[in-house]
Image: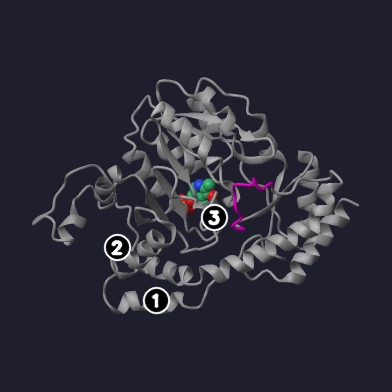
Amino acid sequence: MIPFNKPFLTGKEAHYMYEAVYTGKLSGNGKFTKLCQKFFEEKYGFKKALMTTSCTDALEMAAILCDVKPGDEVIVPSYTFVSSALAFVRQGAKIVFADSCNNNPNIDADKLESLITEKTKVIVPVHYAGVACDMDKIMAIAEKYNLLVVEDAAQAIDSFYKGRPLGSIGHLAAFSFHETKNVISGEGGLLAINDERFIRRSEIIWEKGTNRSEFFRGEVNKYGWVDTGSSFLPSEIISAFLYAQLENLDMIQNRRKAIWQQYYNGLLNLQEKGILQLPNLPAYATNNAHMFYLVCRSLEERTALIKYLKENGVCAVFHYLSLHLSDYNKNHSDFIPELPACDQFADCLVRLPMFYELKDEEVAMIIKLIIDFFG
Ligand SMILES: *Cc1c(COP(=O)(O)O)cnc(C)c1O
């Protein structure tokens, strides 16, 4: 069976983890945490990068930093992972779900303005499959209504919008290093802070509500409890693992992009015949090959395709269920919007195997199976 995902190891992970262990610095904010943070700050221009134990945690930090309070409204696409909404729900926010574009699962920036009320505080664009949302439009709306923008860049490492790195455009951004992402540490994440107003407070929230980071830099002569927060920082062992991956980022990205292109070229003919839809990359967006998906014409067709691939040794999987139709949302809100584009992706989108060690012959075999399926 060709799996959907297989975590890739560069070979240096255990070495760096051993180094973290034998130097006796196992808790967070040591050498490897700082190396990873510096990597992101220098390569992508984030004003400040803080390693976290997950993208979910980074989003929770963002919700605290945005000072989201009960009654505030946060606009989130419905076609996303639970965490994009849950991190703000935990602060008491009401989630206003937004629809996807018709030809792309990202939030439809043209429909955004109609969702804004005087209670709106934050917009959370999710760069699905690592493909940029229309950030100029989103940032202009945020500026007009004095809102904050938190990019859910969980899938968006090393991807760009008009040449600008994703995660560097919103006031805050969250990345994931979960084992299903391009660059991994098992569980892990990163909060990128691009608005300087948030930098001081972000370190305090990260370190359990204390000003410990300032103390270790010698800026204050004792540290204590000054704010809310939690234990958001990962151990050095996690950052050591991640650092080995970051050193090989270009190698990982190049292989993933080659696989993506092979799928695209091999399936283009089916799109031209109107049989299925391939990923649509707007002119402003790059491709980081986080995912290769296709969109079938109906739920029945998708179910049959997944079954056919499985019978032939290939694990292909659907993705998100619309959050606005989730049990949680139905039980917690009195208004369920109609979001047809989101529902269409929930019913018809299927993801193909995508991982570093996937071989050219395997990709060719998967392409052939899909062509055979559609006759
Ligand atoms: C993976 C993912 C998350 C959650 O990441 P974790 O690191 O597992 O918390 C959040 N949002 C999106 C869009 C994701 O793809």
x and y percentages locating residue 112 in the rendered image: 54, 29
Judging by the rendered image, the residue that carries numbered circle 3 is 159
Q: Earlier in the sequence, mark 1 or mark 2?
A: 1
Earlier along the polypeptide chain: callout 3 or callout 1?
Answer: 1
Query: On the rendered image, what quadrant is the N terminus found in?
Result: bottom right
The residue shown at (15%, 57%) is: 215
Q: What's under tag 2, amino acid-wise?
A: Gly
- Which numbered disc, 3 or 1, marks the residue closer to the eye? 3
Residue numbers of the magenta segment: 280-289
Q: Please identify the dominant SS of the magenta region.
A: loop
Viewer-proximal residue among 66 and 163: 163
Q: Is residue 8 visible?
A: no
Q: Residue 16 has which mark?
A: 1
Q: Mark 1 is on which residue type?
A: Tyr
Q: Is mark 1 within 8 Å of ligand 1?
A: no
Q: Residue at x 36, y 61 (%)?
A: 37
Q: Furthest residue to the left? A: 221
Asked whether residue 323 is in view, the answer is yes
Residue at figure coordinates x 69%, y 46% from the top left: 280
Q: Which mark is residue 28?
A: 2
